[in-house]
Image: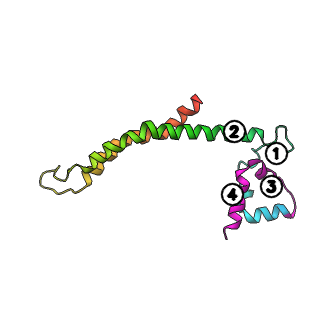
């Protein structure tokens, strides 16, 4: 059951192999389409550099390495300077007893959830948006 998906996963790990398989004709192409039905509908199927083109897999690997290093640096920087400093204040805000925050009502942990969500919201937004900044700098 999972074998076709694993074959497709391995083929997509090396983009030039995936592009080469998509360029086949005949019964092997039919087998590839059977294993991956969306292969025929894949919009970016002709964007990879094929084996016969100048450069081979070089430009594709360069592109992949660019994005891999960009994401590694972004994730490590964001963890070290955005997420890790918020752990202790989040634990402190979670341990506060804010259940009597609204007089006459027992709210339980709802105020704590609100405080933590408001504390993390700007950081999460910046975490999602700073990939564009990293892309410009990289």
The answer to whether the residues at label 1 and label 2 have Cβ atoms under 8 Å apart is no
Label 4 vs 2, first from the N-terminus: 4
Label 4 vs 3, first from the N-terminus: 4
Colouring mode (rainbow / by chain / secondary structure / one colour): rainbow
Label 3 vs 1, first from the N-terminus: 3
Along the viewing direction, whichever of 23 and 3 lies nearer the viewer? 3
Residue linked to disc 2: 63
Tell me the quarter of the image containing the C terminus: top right
Q: Please give the range of residues in magenta.
A: 1-27
Give the mark toward the camera: 3 or 2.
Answer: 2
User: In the drawing, what numbered circle is on residue 9?
Assistant: 4
Residue linked to disc 3: 21
Residue linked to disc 1: 50
Residue 130 vs residue 114: left or right?
right
Whether the magenta-drawn stretch holds residue 62 is answered as: no
User: Visible in this render: residue 104?
Assistant: yes
Residue 57 x/y as whole percent: 78, 42
User: In the drawing, what numbered circle is on residue 8?
Assistant: none
Give the mark toward the camera: 1 or 2.
Answer: 2
């Amino acid at each position: 059951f999972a074998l076709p998906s694993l074959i497709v996963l391995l083929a997509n790990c090396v983009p030039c192999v995936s592009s080469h398989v998509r360029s086949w004709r005949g019964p092997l192409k039919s087998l590839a389409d059977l294993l991956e039905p969306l292969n025929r509908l894949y919009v970016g199927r002709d964007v990879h550099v094929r084996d016969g083109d100048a450069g081979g897999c070089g430009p594709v690997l360069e592109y992949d390495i660019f994005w891999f290093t960009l994401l590694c640096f972004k994730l490590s920087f964001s963890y070290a300077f955005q997420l890790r400093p918020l752990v202790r204040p989040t634990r402190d805000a979670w341990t506060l007893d804010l259940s009597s925050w609204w007089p006459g009502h027992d709210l339980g942990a709802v105020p704590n959830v609100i405080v933590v969500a408001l504390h993390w919201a700007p950081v999460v937004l910046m975490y999602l948006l700073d990939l564009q900044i990293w892309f410009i700098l990289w």
